[in-house]
Image (cartoon, rainbow, N blue to C red):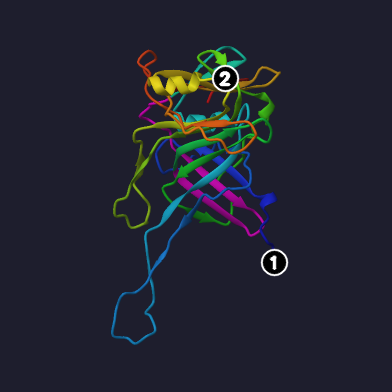
Amino acid sequence: MARSLGARARLALGFETTYGTPPASGFIRMPFAPGLTVAAEQPLLDSELLGYGRDPLAPVKDAITADGDVVVPIDAEAWGHWLKAAFGVPTTSGTGPYTHEFQSGAWDLPSFALEKGLPEVPHFAMYPGCRVNQLQWSMERSGLVTATVGVIAQGEDKSAASQAGTLTEPALRRFGSFNGSVQRDGAALGNLVSAEITYANNLDRVETLRADGKIDGVEPGIAALTGNVVVRFADETLLQQAIDGAACELVFGYALPSGESFTLTAHAVYLPRPRIGIDGPQGIQATFDWQAARDPGTGRMATATLINDVDLY
């Protein structure tokens, strides 16, 4: 009897034309890291009936929930598909390399289908009607660069064979921590130890009564762009900004020597006034839990820019 192995698992993504209907072709093999939790779950409800003795009656099935996380590398090509799902279709310019600009605030977020395949069993689970609820990643001096993508799906359809067809496989060119940088108002943010970034669509499930147990859809709520920066306390620039209640622009980016790059620009970032404690004789650090808002000048909260040799997303 075959046993499923994570090393042989695969993940395929295909954008839908109609919500909840997986495409007949055009699926992409997506790279992913340990931590894939997208799945359907259906809990059991304990029987509340009395009068049948101390032993309980059979439980009743509750509603089905299909969602979870996908841990993915931030790279020069496949990452663009997750950006498209989170922000909407980008504006593309150039003739190679191409510049793809994703803007926050879009009402029309594309839906996609995910297929999680375990070929040894065989077990192939198709998740139609997926939308990205949030993207989250951190920046540090060293280590692998991955992001956690939160996904909400309409439901789950199981099959003994793949329904994704022939897969397109993007070239994998990963960004590393060494390639990362953070800028504040056009200048490098000094004394930076680490940073965290979370973009959330705050999706709302449309949970109507259906015979198949699936939801009717997911609708975007008020978006949020939040995170934190941890800095060695060497000057009062950020502290003074927090006290003044002023906004700044933060740009989180990665760039490869071959020319590919990814940047996320938070156009109007506000900082809270943090506690600055002394924990010992070592250097003192301060953590600023920032949040972004709509910038009156650009008319949006954030812009994600991906430069690569892909002509269209």
Height in image: 75 above or below 70? Answer: above
| Amino acid at circle 1 | Met
Q: Residue at x 38, y 52 (%)?
A: 214
Magenta includes 34?
no
Rendered-image quadrant of the N terminus: bottom right
Q: Residue at x 69, y 26 (%)?
A: 178
Q: Where residue 304 sits in the image (x, y, percent)?
A: 50, 23
Marks 2 and 1 sit apart, C-alpha to C-alpha, by 56 Å
Q: Which residues are magenta?
A: 104-129
Between 53 and 287, which is closer to the camera in this rendering? 287
Neighbourhood count class around disc 1 (C-alpha, 10 Å): few under 14, some 14–19, many 20 upward: few
Q: Amino acid at mark 2?
A: Leu
Q: Give percent across and percent down for residue 252.
A: 55, 24
Q: Is residue 241 left or right of residue 205?
A: right
Q: What residue is pinned by disc 1?
A: 1
In what element is the residue under mark 2? loop
Q: Position of residue 203 (x, y in %)?
A: 38, 40
Q: Which residue is mark 2?
A: 189
In which quadrant of the rendered view does residue 142 lie?
Answer: top right
On the question of residue 268 being in view, the answer is: no
The residue tagged with tag 1: helix, strand or loop? Answer: loop
Q: Looking at the image, do the residues carrying marks 2 and 1 touch, with CB atoms under 8 Å apart?
A: no
Vertical side of 301 occupied by 135: above or below:
below
